[in-house]
Image (cartoon, rainbow, N blue to C red):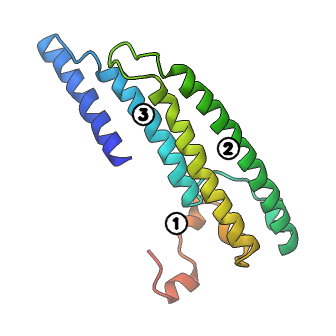
Amino acid sequence: MAAALALMAILVFGNVVLRYLFNSGITWSEEMSRFLFVWLIFLGAIGALTDNEHLGVDMFVKRLPDFWKKVVFVITNGLILYVLWLVLDGSWKMTLINLDSKAPATGMPLGFMYGIGILMSICMAIVVVANLYRVLFRKRPVDDFIRVKESEEEMLVPAPQQIAEGGGR
C-alpha cells in the first residue's frame, strides 16, 4: 500500500510539474494513478478488516448476553462471507471479460483493474473464517472482535487500568 501511494504521489506531482513548467506531461500518469488508487483502496480494506477497523454499529449487540453475541457474530460473518462470494464472482467475471481489453494510455489489460476484487474477496474471506474459527473453537470472546468506542474522547483518554499497566499514551 505504501509503494502504491508513493508511486501515485510521484506520478501526479511529476505530471503537474511537467504540465505547468514545461507545457507537457506523462500521458499514462493519470491512468496509472487511477489503477494504483483502486488497488490501494482494496488492499486497505483487507488491512482494515485484519485490524478490525471497519465501521460498525454495536448498540444492539453490546446489550446481548454472551451466547447471543456469538450467534449474531456468526450470522453477520456468514452474511459477510456471502457478500464476499458475490464480489469474488463478479470480479472473476469482469476480469475474464476485460482480459483482452486494453487501457487507452498504458495499454495494460483492464482485467488488472478488476483482478484486485478477486484478491480482496479471497483475503477478506480468509480473515473472516479465521475470526469465526477463533470465536467458535478457540473460545475467544466476541468482544475481542468488536472495537467500537462510545466517543472519540474515550478513545483518546487512556483507561485507569491501561495507565496502571503502562499502556497509557
Label 2: element kind: helix
Could you tell me which residue is drawn at 60 percent across and 51 percent down?
Answer: 124
Tell me, yes or no, if residue 143 can be seen here.
no
Q: Position of residue 130 (x, y in %)?
A: 64, 64
Could you tell me which residue is drawn at 83 percent across and 74 percent down?
Answer: 66
Residue tagged 1? 156
User: Furthest-top residue in view?
Assistant: 23
Q: Depth check: give the residue in front, 12 or 161.
A: 12
Label 1: element kind: helix
Residue tagged 2? 84
| Callout 2–callout 1 Cβ contact below 8 Å | no
Q: Which mark is residue 37?
A: 3
Label 2 or label 1, whichever comes before in sequence order: 2
In the rendered structure, which amino acid carries the disc numbered 2? Answer: Leu
Label 2 or label 3, whichever comes before in sequence order: 3
Judge whether 140 appears above or below 24 on screen.
Answer: below
In the rendered structure, which amino acid carries the disc numbered 3? Answer: Phe
Label 3: element kind: helix
Judge whether 111 appears above or below 22 on screen.
Answer: below
Circle 2 crowding by C-alpha within 10 Å: few under 14, some 14–19, many from 20: many
In the rendered structure, which amino acid carries the disc numbered 1? Answer: Leu
User: Furthest-bottom residue in view?
Assistant: 164
Tell which tag, 3 or 1, sits nearer the viewer: 3
Marks 2 and 3, how far apart at CA: 21 Å
Asked which quadrant contains residue 35, the reply is: top left
Q: Depth check: give the residue in front, 122 or 35.
A: 122
Q: Which mark is residue 65?
A: none
Tally the marks.
Answer: 3
Label 3 or label 1, whichever comes before in sequence order: 3
Asked which quadrant contains residue 49, the reply is: bottom right
